[in-house]
Amino acid sequence: MNIRQLGLTALLFGLPGISVALSFPLPSEGNDIVGETREVQTRYEDTFSDIARLNDLGYAELAESNPGVDPWLPGEGTTIVLPARFILPAGPREGIVINLAELRLYYYPKGEGRVITHPLGIGREGWSTPTGSTRIIRKQHKPTWRPPKSVRKEHEEKGDPLPLVVKPGPDNPLGEHALYLSMSGYLIHGTNKPYGVGMRVSHGCIRLYPEDIASLFSQVPVNTPVRIINTPYKAGWENGQLFVEAHPPLSEQREEQGFNFTPMVRAILQAIGEQDLKPDWDAMKLAAKGQRGIPVAVTSAPPTKLHKPLLSPQSNLLLSNSLEQMEPETD
């Protein structure tokens, strides 16, 4: 962390509820990584939720990157890793890209050569946020919430009935700003419960910190394309080295597939293409097991272009099998 960043983080730690927006120039051609991993020292009263919001990160991101640390009472002077280094999702760098497994949004303002990224809250199990391509069809400041019948039924069963219409104000879960998607019934919006950002807590909609959605609302035009993906494993390049960023798959995937690392192998092979590259197998296994959400280098030297695939089908199968035999680390 440079001196300016140290000073900014120290200043913001004294201003509750104010976060550091994460905005980066797009990497040069052939590169895919932005940001940097940083560290802070905790005060006695700090929690992961406090630290996450101050640094525009989510609760789950901090928990992944700091295994073994009590998220509600890390203690005085504990070193906390801030995972603010990201492999950009594969695919076009345009509009908004939401990666559910990562609990993170990427926005590429048209013609500005930069990316803005924010943490998300998404649908909990049973109310999963869908994947697919959509677009923003409407923007609303101080939105009114009309709870769908299914949500009202759930609240009634819990003895907490909802009105048919929730007007703008502190009790409105949409917060102060909402971006309506062409995917019927789904929104990108703020929240009156910021601690839920970076977790799976919603009925399927996509929540941002109030300050993040206010900023995004002012920048994103109607008709902006939105691509929602579910990619636990990302692979990308930086200065000739290949990196992998691994996140725990969503619970539905784990229940259906177990800890299946084939998607990680696929991401690596897609990034490698036809190149002469010697992967660091130990680093690949570490990334697969750790699932810490921090890019890990899996090559030790820049590649040389070839006209044949790096790995044979047999090698692909061996790699996939060796990864799938491992259990991820738990703490």
Image: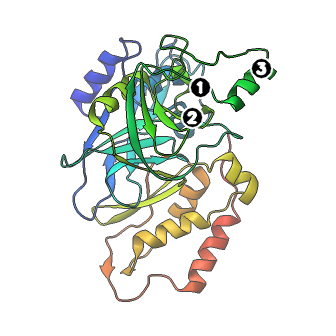
Seen from this angle, which residue lies furthest front?
164
Kind of element beneath mark 3:
helix
Check disc 3 and report the residue beneath it. Answer: 156
Disc 2 from disc 1: Cα separation:
7 Å
Q: Amino acid at mark 3?
A: Glu
Query: Which residue is rendered at x = 68% and y = 53% of the image?
Result: 253
Disc 3 from disc 2: Cα separation:
33 Å
> Looking at the image, which is closer to me, 265 or 65?
265
Q: Amino acid at mark 1?
A: Pro
> Looking at the image, which is closer to me, 32 or 229?
229
**Horizontal placement of 18 versus 69: left or right?**
left
- Image mark for residue 230: none
**Horizontal placement of 331 versus 302: left or right?**
right
Q: Counting residues from the N terminus, which is met first, the one under dot 2 or under dot 1?
A: 2
- Residue 40: x %, y % from top left: 40, 27
Q: Residues within 10 Å of mark 2 (few under 14, many from 20)?
A: many
- Image mark for residue 71: 1
Query: Which residue is rendered at x = 61% and y = 55% of the image?
Result: 289
Query: Which residue is rendered at x = 34% and y = 86% of the image?
Result: 306
Q: Is mark 2 in CB contact (under 8 Å) with mark 1? A: yes
Check disc 2 and report the residue beneath it. Answer: 63
Q: Quadrant of residue 20?
A: top left
Q: Counting residues from the N terminus, which is met first, the one under dot 3 or under dot 2?
A: 2
Kind of element beneath mark 1:
loop
Kind of element beneath mark 2:
helix
Disc 1 from disc 3: Cα separation:
32 Å
> Looking at the image, which is closer to me, 187 or 251?
187
Residue 55 visible here: no
- Residue 71: x %, y % from top left: 59, 25
- Residue 62: x %, y % from top left: 51, 34
Q: Amino acid at mark 2?
A: Ala
- Residue 111: x %, y % from top left: 18, 49
